[in-house]
Image (tube, helix red, strand yellow):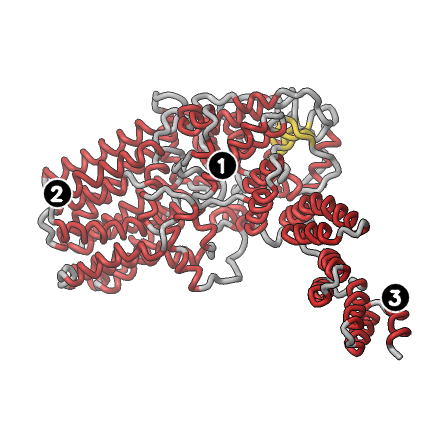
Amino acid sequence: MDKRSSLTAVLIFLVTFLLYGLTVSPDITFEDSPELVTAVHTLGIPHPPGYPFFILASKLFSFLPLGPIEKRINLSSSFFTALAMVFLFLAFLNVSERLKLKNNLTFSAFIVLLLSISSTLWSNALVTEVYASYLMLFSIQLFLLTRLLIKTDLKYIYLFIFISGLALGSHYTSVFMGFAFILFFLKKKWFRSLTLKHYLSFIALFFLGASIYLYLPLRAMQHPVLNWANPSNFKNFISVISRQQYGPFPEKWLSLKNIINSFQTINPLYEFYQGSGENLLPQFILILPLGLILYLVYRGVWRTRGQRDILYLFSFVFFSYTFLLILMTQTPPGKLFTLKVFFIPAWISLYFFSGLGLFHLFRSKTLILILCPVLFFFNLPFHSHGNYHYTGDYADNLFKNLSYGSVIFTVKDNETFPLWELSCIKYKRPDVSIVNVVILSEPWYLEGLQRHDRNLRIGLPYLKGRFAKKQIRRTLINDIIKNNPDRPLYITSLAFKEYVDIDQNAYSCGVLYSLDEKKENNTGYLYYLNFKNLEINYNIFLIAFERLALENFRFPHYLDAQSKLALSSLSRLLHEYGESLYAYKLSVYFNKVIGLGINNVYAFTRIGDLFLQKKDIRRFIYFYKKAILLQPRSSYARELQSKIEKVTRQPVNRWLEQAEEHYRRKNYPRALALYMNILQHYQDSKIYSGIGDCYFQMENIPQAIQFYKKAIEFDKQYITPYYNLGGCYVMTGDRAKAIQIWKKGLTVSAENTLLKDALKKWGK
């Protein structure tokens, strides 16, 4: 590598690290960030597989004298991502050398700068997540592999194998690069000059890198505060590294159609499109990179064997980090947003092909001078997290709502992890016991509670035997309630009842629910509105909110599911405490951000409730039905459907009473109009029969017959239309049909006296 290339690599690192450092979040964020910050600071063990490389590498950044501990650890992601950009630049230099590109330096810098400002890459460089270290190690693997394709050198093979072992301590998807190495190892016949000593060295180096996993049992033996699954013995250790907590391999395989549909989520161009749910990029957008690949074939870029190796390598990376990943995880298209960051290597591959094609098309440096700044300024407003305190304030406000000595039962990660971080790192509210009900059924968690929370009295040991997890949770929670009678009890959400069935009622109490008693005149909910810098984090939203112009507002920012849930809770509070106008406007805003690819059943329900409050029944039904479609077979969906039927029947019952009253007064046209109006909102056999009665009294027998038939088709158990339909046929002179209808009615209700009398009179 010449001096110019070295200087460019250093410049890329400084520019990207400065960019990420200036926009990095100074506080925890939602998802795994609070748990990982806690694990890094306390040298604990996070959720499986434990991520030892990330924990140990990020721990070094906690010693930097640069602001709060959360910001220091967040900076580790910024550093890893900036370093990844350097190795990607070097990898692209290797590739451009192999392809004999004239502007190889410009090409490599162009692709790397595009990647550095892409949405997912940028956002993960600002928070504590394992994906930044995973990307860095992937980039090193890619650099070494492209170097080996240029020149076979044993030292690069040694280094690649060591990094591959180390990468397993960051993320398991690194095995795909191991597969790529094996394929080229066989294809290029690198094994020809190797001896047994070399192979033994390979094995030793791989296990030396993978030995970073020894951190887990060694640290678990010291009982850290965060000790997920307690891998201090061999059985638990295997359980952690094999991720047994997440269940067995899926039995039902995705269809090929679902896998193809997944391109809507894994498409790299989605990174630069922030639109509503109705306008997600269509699948055919992949025509652009695929068309550029074909153009490169036409231009003869893959002419030589060495050049085709580059094509094979990046094609394999794309294939393995898309199709193979989807096949391994069996994640349906609707849930692929949860794996979005896993697809970054595939995006790198497509960026490479697209960038190469664009350079061959335009052959100008003007492209990099125009496209990169445009995309930078497009994404900057959405990734400037320098004043983000939303998640930390959320957890702090939860604590503020708790009485002294409370026990708070949490459910979801986004309720639990921020509280862990505040408790373990900032030592807030040591009087409060935090109990996660989901993992309470795990023996290691119960042991940790008993060891580290001396204020929480638990009388029962872990239940051994063949007990269902819900039964274990119920028993232990009832034991906690029994043994802590003087401590106030709270839950974070009503999802609590999905995991455990207890006798206590839950009463709304600010941002929480109390299990003790309904608290009158509670003003704790006001804490929820006290968010530092919320106007900076969501400045556009708040300006529109305060000006009461939210209905006409378009907010294109991608908002994560957790922030949506928090906004939904805020909407609920405003609604419950009388701020209905603000709650409605917040929900209108919330409806707009819902459409960005992450649908949430509770959000749709909340919006439906607020439309119901405004007596907008049509929109209430619309949002409830959208919620039902997300979980069609759940008990929650049945509850929503029941509420729809109940609400829709309220005006229908009133109209039905009016129609019946007009019918009794022999005002048949008015009764008919009311019945017809009811039919537009609610269908029922009695409605059809009532319309038939009106037509019968108005001597419109053909129409009466049609509606009596519809009444029978709708509900074959309803007897009245059988009798009336038979009467219509008698009036038209078709006695045979009348007898047939009445006999059919008797098969439904054999003892019906009306039908029997009609047959007795007319059946002779």
Indicate which disc, 3 or 1, sits on the residue closer to the N terminus: 1
Q: Label 1: few (<14), some or many (≥20) within 10 Å?
A: many
- Where is residue 258 shown, x and y percent of the image? 44, 60
Residue carrying label 1: 590
Which residue is painted at 13% across and 43% down in the image? 105
Q: Which one is nearer the viewer's eye here, 170 or 486?
A: 486
- Identify the secondary structure beneath mark 2: loop
Above or below, comparing residue 552 to residue 148 in the picture: above
Above or below, comparing residue 585 to residue 648 in the picture: above
The amino acid pointed to by label 1 is Phe
Which part of the image, by quadrant, shows the C terminus?
A: bottom right
Above or below, comparing residue 238 to residue 736 in the picture: above
Kindly indicate the quadrant of the structure image that contains residue 509. Answer: top right
Residue carrying label 3: 754
Which residue is painted at 77% across and 48% down in the image? 662
Which part of the image, by quadrant, shows the N terminus?
A: top left
Name the mark on residue 365.
2
Kindly indicate the quadrant of the structure image that contains residue 411. Answer: top right
Q: Is residue 522 visible?
A: yes
Which residue is painted at 30% across and 31% down in the image? 20
The amino acid pointed to by label 3 is Leu
- Where is residue 639 shown, x and y percent of the image? 67, 47
Q: Which one is nearer the viewer's eye here, 609 or 225?
A: 609
Q: Which one is nearer the viewer's eye here, 622 or 677?
A: 677
329 relative position to 686: left or right:
left
Which residue is painted at 68% across and 55% down in the image? 683
Look at discs 3 and 1 and give the one toward the viewer.
Answer: 3
Name the mark on residue 508.
none
101 relative position to 397: left or right:
left
- Where is residue 289 shown, x and y percent of the image? 26, 55
Indicate which disc, 2 or 1, sits on the residue closer to the N terminus: 2
Q: State how far apart marks 2 and 3 are (Cα).
A: 91 Å
